[in-house]
Image (tube, grey):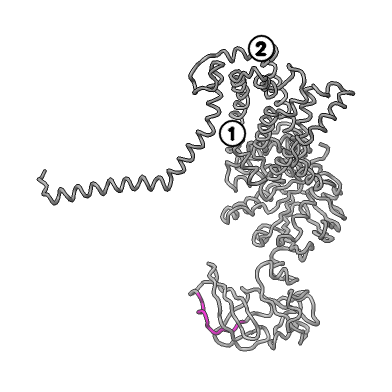
Amino acid sequence: MEQELTKEELKAYKKAKEQLTDARKESFGKWLRTKGWKHLIGWVMIVYSVFPIVYVISGSFADADQFTSTLFTSFTTDNYRDLFADEYRPFGAWFVNTLFISGTAAIGSVFLSALAAYAFSRLRFTGRRAGLLTLILVQMFPQLLALVAIYALLVNIGNVFPFLGIGSQLALIMVYLGGALGANTYLMYGFFNTIPKELDEAAKIDGATHTQIFYGIILRLAAPILAVIGLLAFIGTSSDFVLANIILTKPESKTLAVGLYMYVSDQFGQRWTIFAAGAVLAAVPIVALFLYLQKYIVSGLTGGAVKG
Amino acid sequence: MATDFVARGQDLELVEVRKEFPGFVAVESLDLKIPAGEFFALLGPSGCGKTTTLRMIAGLETPTSGKVLIGGKDVTDQKPHERPVNTVFQNYALFPHMTVLENVAFGLRQRKVDDPLPKATAALEMVELNHLASRRPQQLSGGQQQRVALARALVNRPALLLLDEPLGALDLKLRRQMQLELKDIQSEVGLTFLHVTHDQEEAMDMADTVAVMNHGRIEQMGAPEKLYDRPKTAFVAKFLGQSNLFVGEVTDKSSETISINFRGNKITAPNSRIEKSSGKVAIGVRPEKTEFHESKPAASSTQNVLGPGKITDIRFTGVSNQYQIEIPEIGEITVFAQNVGRSPVVELGAEVWVSWKVEHSFGLADLPTGEEDIE
């Protein structure tokens, strides 16, 4: 039954309604104080990290003179075409070189550090402790410090074995393998230690050799850390500039990081849009590898962090 | 492989086996003989060297000196897989990346036995787990994993099976069940079982022979009933069940009994149940063999009587109550009384006398640690 509201009742109703909206306003303020500010920071960080990527993608499709203008003002695929058309700057070859060098270095360093980590984790030998300490110590110094030494070494090696001298991709891979070994071995050593020794012993009782234990049990169970180390090694080597730049001399043997730099290093012909196109393509294999390995990586990173 | 794996149990013999690790001696000159087909338990607190002993028998550790013989053959220098031995580990050590069936078949494949999978299936049938063959170990419960580990060890047809605290991680009910199953399987396959444990109930319940180990030595060895009834050292008396121990100088000796003076009280033990009869002697009695009385019992040559004392604590344990009785000048005595009538039989704080039959006393060869200087 509808009823005429008295003046008092109407007043009370309005007052109640006002209070309700106040409460709502208040609750928004409260939300902002308790949770909202985290969203705000989150969005700022997202924009901060996504912006460069968007900018490079936009730049790779921009006209040569439009690179610094607003995002997506022009659209052309010329940059991608030019990238592959330049015979003095063989992008295709660089791409293959990078995949080859980084891929080999990644697989190699995973394998070598797994071997070393197995020895440190499972075998007891004289010098084990000293060896571990040396590893920590050596991995503290960036390889960059040894640049001059590496250069001199390669020049001399090249005099005897030309296929391992300056200008050789194999030499670069060797340098990468040596440099990555310290930290990776240590990371993997920590992970191997979390695999119960009883598994080895159970296998040993059944007649398994060290080789069988290594391939059949340890490597199978260490898949996460292998993925992490493989990925880190791949990213590290494919973005390396300094070593690749001094060791690889011929244009057709360069890697992407070194080669692409040629597009922006000319004093008068800085071709940023083509560089952007090259950068976008260079990111593709890393992103693909990351997506493929990510299911291992989450557990691998935390596994190493908590237990290692 | 060259080793001839036999289904029948073989005997195990340790001859003066000694194991030193840098800084300490884990096992001191151990002599042990386990007859074929026996269920033998090695019982001791953690760090007593029992697991080291087991690992030396398995071949995972090399003895510093001494010999390990299985079936009369010296295996001291043989590798683990060359010995007719298999082990069930405390944490099962199942390979997480293989199915249950592959886990069981692993040893067969390693030894290049024909038809590994049917044989593995048969082993799983024995532990009634063949319906879970395609699962991964982590999808099984603790008890099921335990049985897979057992199947994996048994499928290799060892002559001697080593069990390293295999039931430690299971809950009480499952443990009882697994104890029964283990015992069944052992009598079924007739293997020699060497069971290492720190759980005295488990050891007494399952084993034909129990060896109590402490500080790398075997303190006492024998059938569980004998060990419980006649502990020879203070360690065994305290580790295997509970004991009330009294230390005093020998005062009386007859052809049948000896008596000690324990802080002014005479405590008597039969000569057939003592280890030494001169100087300071420790005499003990099991708490369930003692009784308490609310009035002073008449002195008698067949009874030891202490008291009066006060009941300071009553612990209800289901079938029985555990009473702590504090007697002035004497100390604390533990008494178990069955809850057949009313419970508790006496109230907290009541004044009681404690008595037990002389024939239930036992004399120890050594004195309890820390008691040597008290007088």
**Among the 4 quarters of the image, the one containing residue A211:** top right
Q: Nearer the viewer, residue A234 or A258?
A: A258
Is B303 located above or below residue A230 in the figure?
below
Q: Is residue A81 left or right of residue B341?
A: right
Q: Is residue A4 left or right of residue A126?
A: left
Q: Nearer the viewer, residue A94 or A228?
A: A94
Q: Position of residue B130 (x, y in %)?
A: 60, 38
Residue furthest to the front: A268
Q: Which residue is mark 2?
A: A86
Residue furthest to the right: A160
Q: Is residue A14 left or right of residue A164?
A: left
Q: Which residue is mark 1?
A: A295
Q: Is residue B57 left or right of residue A58?
A: right
- Image quadrant holding the N terminus of chain B, namely top right
Is residue B110 visible to us here?
no
Q: Main secondary structure of the magenta part?
A: loop
The label shown at residue B233 is none
Is residue B123 visible to us here?
yes
Residue at mark 2 to residue at mark 1: CA–CA distance: 39 Å
Chain of the residue that carries numbered disc 1 in the rendered image: A
Mark 2 or 1, nearer chain start: 2
Q: Residue at x 60, y 28 (%)?
A: A292
Q: Position of residue A217 (x, y in %)?
A: 71, 37
Q: Residue at x 77, y 66 (%)?
A: B219
Q: Which residues are magenta?
A: B344-354
Q: Within 10 angstroms of label 1, few (less than 14), some, or many (20 or more) residues?
A: few
Q: Position of residue B260 (x, y in %)?
A: 74, 84
